[in-house]
Amino acid sequence: MSSSSFTVAVIQAGSVIGDTAATMDKLAQRVAEAAAQGAKLALLPEAFIGGYPKGLDFGARLGSRSLEGRDEFRAYFDAAIEEHGPEAARLGEIAREAGLYLVVGVIERDGGTLYCSVFYYGPDGAYLGKHRKLMPTGMERLIWGFGDGSTLPVLDTPLGKLGAAICWENYMPLLRSAMYGKGVQLYCAPTVDDRDTWLPTMRTIAIEGRCFVISACQFMTTADFPQDHAAYDPAARTLIRGGSCVVDPLGRVLAGPLFEQEGVLLADIDIDQIARGKFDLDVVGHYARPDVFSLIVDETPRAVVRFETRGAGADD
């Protein structure tokens, strides 16, 4: 590989439902496998830590919630992790031990609210920041809060400019434009969308943004739930079939899509391909029309409660 090339790993796996500690152990094993194969960046799917409760309704109906559903949410709440909690610290340790950049989908607990988030870690184990999903889809809005514009980072790393959009955020044209405006080069798309339409979406984003798109999807069956769980079925019916992939800036599929199994996909990335692609298309540069179209992104943190302390001698 050239000096501008490196290997990325997409880890297609499912959470250990209801067992965050076991999920962390599984993540550590998979990340170590990726590092052993030379990966410098590893991406895990949406909601890998904490789990994606596909098919569950938490006992909610229009105008009513059941006690059983509240108990189910409490268990889900307990499986989530906090931004600076012990599980988050361990993710940093896993990244450091593997010596790679780690991008992982988590269910983040903040106060009494859960968020679908991505946490970023450097190869030295440092926590680099997070992205909270701006717009949960459908029933997700019942269990997850909404992110704001303050967690839309594109991180400047030695590998390239690294950012993420979660699942159906990738269908938000203005969010994609914000990412392109920040110069994203390694566009991560953690998801649980396993439909045939996902790969063409990833190829479109890669072509549109002239960036590498790296997408990780979960693989999960009904047998992955605990036996006392309402969704458990020993017949192991597929709930999320995968579809992880890596696409280059000209829309060529470098790895995947992988279906109906867990696995680690590897792809060699040559960052110089981005400049080759921008030669004839830069949607926030020479191919833009700012005299006709423009986008304003509000990155202000939106706190419901703000505490202010007046300095000594301030007027009453």
Image (cartoon, rainbow, N blue to C red):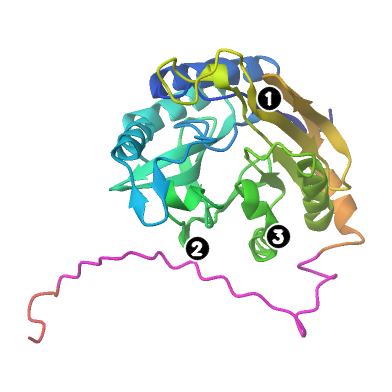
Q: Earlier in the sequence, mark 2 or mark 3?
A: 2
* Residue 109 shown left or right of residue 128 in the figure: left
| Magenta-span inclusion, residue 302 | yes
Secondary structure character of the magenta stretch overall: loop
**Between marks 2 and 3, how big is the CA–CA gap?**
15 Å
Q: Which image quarter holds the N terminus?
A: top right
Circle 1 Cα neighbour tier, 10 Å, few/some/many (<14 / 14–19 / ≥20):
many
Q: Which amino acid is tagged 2?
A: Gly
Q: Residue at x 76, y 26 (%)?
A: 258
Q: Earlier in the sequence, mark 1 or mark 2?
A: 1
* Residue 202 shown left or right of residue 53 in the figure: right
Where disc 3 sits, the SS reads helix
> Is disc 2 in contact with disc 3, using a CB cutoff of under 8 Å?
no
* Residue 237 shown left or right of residue 310 in the figure: right
Q: Nearer the viewer, residue 182 or 55?
A: 55
Instruction: Give the residue furthest to the right.
Output: 280
Q: Earlier in the sequence, mark 1 or mark 3?
A: 1
What range is drawn magenta here? 283-309
Where disc 2 sits, the SS reads helix
Q: Residue at x 41, y 41 (%)?
A: 108
Q: Read off the residue under disc 2.
A: 149
Q: Read off the residue under disc 1.
A: 39
Q: Which amino acid is tagged 1?
A: Ala
Circle 3 Cα neighbour tier, 10 Å, few/some/many (<14 / 14–19 / ≥20):
many
Q: Residue 19 placed where, x, y %?
A: 40, 21
Q: Which dot, 1 or 2, sits closer to the camera?
A: 2
- The answer to whether residue 72 shows anywhere in this view is yes
Q: Which dot, 2 or 3, sits closer to the camera?
A: 2
Q: Residue 27 placed where, x, y %?
A: 53, 21
**Between marks 1 and 3, how big is the CA–CA gap?**
25 Å
